[in-house]
Image (spheres, rainbow, N blue to C red):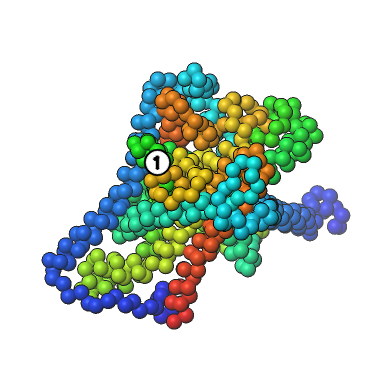
Amino acid sequence: MGVSTSATAPHPSDRQRAVRDRTRRRLTRRKAVNGLMLGVVALCVVLVLVPLALILAHLLRTGAGALDGAFFTHMPAPVGERGGGMANAIVGTLILVGVAAVVGVPVGVGAGVYVAERRGTWLANTVRFLSDVLNGLPSIVMGIFAWQFLVRPVGHFSALSGGVALGAMMIPMVARTTEEMVRTVPVSLREAALALGYPRWRTALVVVLRTASAGIVTGALVALARVAGETAPLLFTAFGNQFWSTDLTQPIAALPLQIFNYAISPYDDWHRLAWAGALVLIAIILVLSVIARAATRNRFDASAGS
Amino acid sequence: MANAPQVRTIDAGTPPFVSIHDRAMGDVIYRGVILFFALCVPLLVLLVGWEIARAGWPALHRFGLSFLTSSEWNPVKHIFGAAPAIYGTLASSAIALVLATPLALGVSVWLSEFSPRSLRQPVAFLVDLLAAIPSVVYGLWGIFVLLPVLRDPVMPFLRDRLGLGHTPFFSGPAYGPSLLAAGIILAIMILPYIASVSREVLLAVPRSQREAALALGATRWEAIWHTVLPHARTGIAGGVILGLGRALGETMAVTMVIGNRPEISASLLAPGYTMASLIANEFSEASSDAHLSALMAVGFTLFVITILVNAAARWLVWRVERGGRVWA
């Protein structure tokens, strides 16, 4: 009889059912964990985007409220006087970024080309590694270095020393993107040029660098955008200036410095100007970044379509 | 020609009818020029280290090891101990890592595993945008938005409502400017760096690994947890350490929200100091050579620490890029 067998050992179908039930319960739990973790991960995305939205919203609201024509055309007003602008700081930042580009781009591109062409040699590896290290160097360290190296011997602050500090910070960024861009140039292109009798240097300049130029321009602009917002390297080099100056040997005003000085001041009017300055600074950075992206997109889209 | 990366004609100018001699000269010059530029990078690193070490030597020599361990920083009496600044740097960076790492990992997992194709690019762009905001703007936001919020609802809530005030870490008055504020700002700032490195590492995990796990009946999360994340572990660690390097040296935003008081306090609600903010605050006002030299010595300490941290991070990331068994 079926009753007697089930008393000694579980009925086969019972055991199968138990296993099936357990598997089902476990599967439900595993699916629940799966769904839960998907939710957690999505929540992380929201949590990250919230500060960005808060910062940008506050910046737009406060900055746009304080921004007017005088901000771009007027000099900073003395303490206690309302109004005034940051015309000198905007021009100062553009000058500093210009000096930085003159210093940083040639060295960065040259180093990047070297690392790409001599890939695998110990010097190339060392340069690549050290440019990564340099990229991670705190900007304040670059600032006190520039002070010690360029300001202390001369005896006074100067726009030049600030620009050089920013340029030095650009070198590793430009070198890295140049290297990556040069590596994407097909070997066949280079070999074709060499086979036509081009010397190596003309191959490099006319074929390799021109093919990679869009990417290199993008990299340089991105690096410029990043150093344009730097404050710490300028504290003891460009120093800031309340007056109009375009002289490279004199202290010069810069937007980030002006924002910092106004932010830590006790005056409401200056706080408003700091927000306006921050908005203009972000706008400059975004414009540089957008141009950078456009530079690459046009070239590659054109080539892909043909 | 599906494989051709680009189909473009290049107008390379007139063919070069030059003598072998000119050609060799050109190549020599070309090689020399790029070698010179390449050598600029190691020279710059050495020069930075040398100049700062030289300027900081008097202080390092005079105070020796006590420069790192003493907590008295008194420019008037010419006594300099950088321990509070070193503590503040490590503490604020640690808070930042604790806050930023899980969030950054979550974002990169979502981007590489779950996100719809149409959302991947925009979200990645927005996260990267966090890295484009200048430090001084973060500081501005910190002073006028974050600090008031921390001072009123957040800090008293953590201390009194949650009862964390009984631990030494959340005790004391809530001024606003504090290690906690610095840690939060730093977390927002380093997040995009950690997220972008780990996203790339996760995307580099071979598809076959995921498919093998899914074929064995794993759920998507199990496939991520048991195969994808272990595979990417080394690279993610590299990204986190890279973020640590950023946090250690970050200057302006921290200076603006940390309170700048050279004291060691276990409480995260208390103001502190970091090495970078110490230099930023006192450098222009340093009147004596001893003070200047002490600040340079702080800079040199920061230089050495960040170089070590960055070297470690790069080493880890390189190991992943080279491929092979990365989960050793």
Residue A46 falls in image quadrant:
bottom right
| Residue B234 in sight in this render | no
Residue extending farthest to the bottom is A306
**For the point 44% across and 82% down, which residue is it?**
A306
Q: Is residue B122 above or below residue B93?
A: below
Q: Is residue A53 above or below residue B86?
A: below
**For the point 49% across and 70% down, which residue is it?**
A297
Instruction: Out of B65 and B203, give the one closest to the viewer.
Output: B65
Q: Amino acid at mark 1?
A: Ala
Q: To which residue does mark 1 refer?
A: A146
**For the point 80% across and 34% down, which residue is it?**
B161
| Residue B207 in sight in this render | yes
The picture places residue B254, in percent across and down from the top left corner, at: 58, 39
Across the whole image, how many numbered discs are drawn on residues? 1
Q: Is residue A56 left or right of residue B291?
A: right
Around disc 1, counting alpha carbons within 10 Å, would you say few (fewer than 14), some (14 to 19), or many (20 or more)?
Answer: many
**For the point 38% across and 78% down, which residue is it?**
B8
Q: Is residue A58 above or below residue B117?
A: above
Q: Quadrant of the N terminus of chain B?
A: bottom left
Chain containing the residue with disc 1: A
Instruction: Out of A31 and B12, give the one closest to the viewer.
Output: B12
Q: Is residue A293 above or below residue B180?
A: below
Q: Is residue A182 left or right of residue B229?
A: left
Residue extending farthest to the top is B77
The picture places residue B271, in percent across and down from the top left corner, at: 63, 31
Instruction: Out of A20 and A107, give the one closest to the viewer.
Output: A107
Element on which disc 1 rests: helix
Instruction: Out of A191 and B228, give the one closest to the viewer.
Output: A191
Residue B2 falls in image quadrant:
bottom left
The picture places residue A15, in percent across and down from the top left corner, at: 77, 55
